[in-house]
Amino acid sequence: MEEETPPPVSPDSRTVQTALDILDGQSRPNRLTRLMPFLGPAFIASVAYVDPGNFATNIQGGAQFGYLLVWVIVASNLMAMLIQTLSAKLGIATGMNLAEQCRARFPRPVVVAMWLLMEIVAMATDLAEFLGAALGFQLLMGIPLFVGALLTALATMLILGMERYGFRPLEAIISSMVGMIALCYLLETIIVKPDWGLVAYHAVVPHFSGAESVLLASGILGATVMPHAIFLHSALTQGRIVVRDQKRLQSLYRFEIADVVIAMGMASFVNIAMLVMAAATFHTTGHSAVGTIEEAYRTLEPLLGSSAKWIFGLSLLLSGLSSSTVGTSAGQVIMQGFMQRHIPIWLRRLVTMAPSLIVIGMGLDPTRTLVVSQVVLSFGLPFAIIPLVMFTRSPDIMGDLVNKRITTAVAAMIAGTILALNAYLLYKTLVTG
């Protein structure tokens, strides 16, 4: 009599079981192996920090002011690390994401208003991401923008289709894309040979050079901390590895901090490398007027050769594809979390993606459209950061993982800084043009 073959163990099941063994102290592999089951959520969220909006602001900042604003990227990413850590902690501690918490704790009219605003934010997010990927297709292959957007929509649906196999395959795909973007910019920095002494100096010494540099600094920050990433990160951790006792919760939270630091550290490197590339290539050669992604792409070849141009185009395409996937996924989380109704998954994704395809099909100026999408995101930021700080400081909500007073104080200060700079960016963009 033949023995029955046991069913295959899914990547998710193996990951969860290994993680639980490590949290229980039953498995004692080396340090890297201990960390691996917990890596993933922050890498998906970190895609929002290397999206095409970052390309636009970092290139403009480096071309106009050289290495001057490197410190803004460093500070922005340190702020983002804390914000994303709080979001991840909310999901771990409560088993609910930020949208679900808002629905459960705010009055109905507030919930409806927040849902509508966050839907607009999700659509604006996807617009920037789809536009970036479409630009990547156009620059690399000569494909029209709208056709590139359709290809992006198809790729997004295919990548998100991996969710049917669990969280691990999707995490692997997105993390690989982030790694490839980082590799592209590692190669770019090798090609451009920046002045590393100046980079190090401006990374730690805050400095501005006139009102325009303050505006660009606000733009860099506005393109860094994204409301959809805050909502998404709490959803990525809420049911991934579920534990409820204090000891394992604290251990899981420490591993998630490591996930955030590694993923956001990689995103920070990519952003710095974008600005450094623009500074070393355009600012130092008298091309400080380069202000768009397309201009940067066309200018790279005569200055650095075709390899630099192709590496830049590939990084933009990967950024657009990965961030459009993450933006669409965030749209699902926002819609499902605020509405608490079963909506067909294809419809949730279509609602988020359709406005992007319509706007791109209208043939609007790509760079100007990117700027407008960033302004819309700035409007939505307070409605993500303020509830996040409110919830994570509440013992009734967070239990053993409630913020320490110093954490809440620093988070509130960061939130105030981000909101003030975004308000300044909105004022300069909408009032003074």
Image (cartoon, helix red, strand yellow):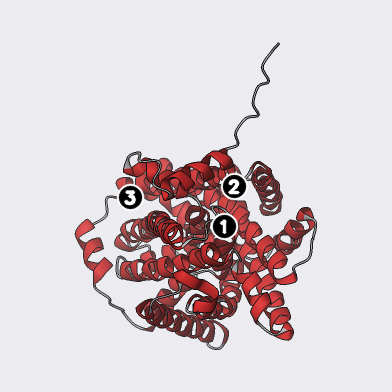
Q: Secondary structure at mark 2?
A: helix
Q: Amino acid at mark 3?
A: Thr
Q: Which mark is residue 9?
A: none
Question: What residue lies at 38% left-to-right and 54% top-to-bottom?
Answer: 262
Q: Position of residue 219 (x, y in %)?
A: 46, 73
Number of residues whose C-alpha sits closer than 10 Å to that of mark 3, classed few (under 14), some (14–19) or many (20 or more) = many
* 3 or 2: mark nearer the eye: 2
Residue corresponding to mark 2: 167
Left or right of 311: which side holds 105? Answer: right
Q: CA distance from mark 3 to mark 1?
A: 32 Å
Residue corresponding to mark 3: 189
- Does residue 326 appear in the picture of this structure? yes
Looking at the rendered image, the quarter that the C terminus falls into is bottom right
* Whether residue 230 is situated above or below residue 188 in the rendered picture: below
In front here: 205 or 304? 205
Residue corresponding to mark 1: 236
Residue contact at pointers 1 and 2, CB within 8 angstroms: yes
Q: Position of residue 138 (x, y in %)?
A: 60, 49
Number of residues whose C-alpha sits closer than 10 Å to that of mark 2, classed few (under 14), some (14–19) or many (20 or more) = some
- Does residue 135 appear in the picture of this structure? no
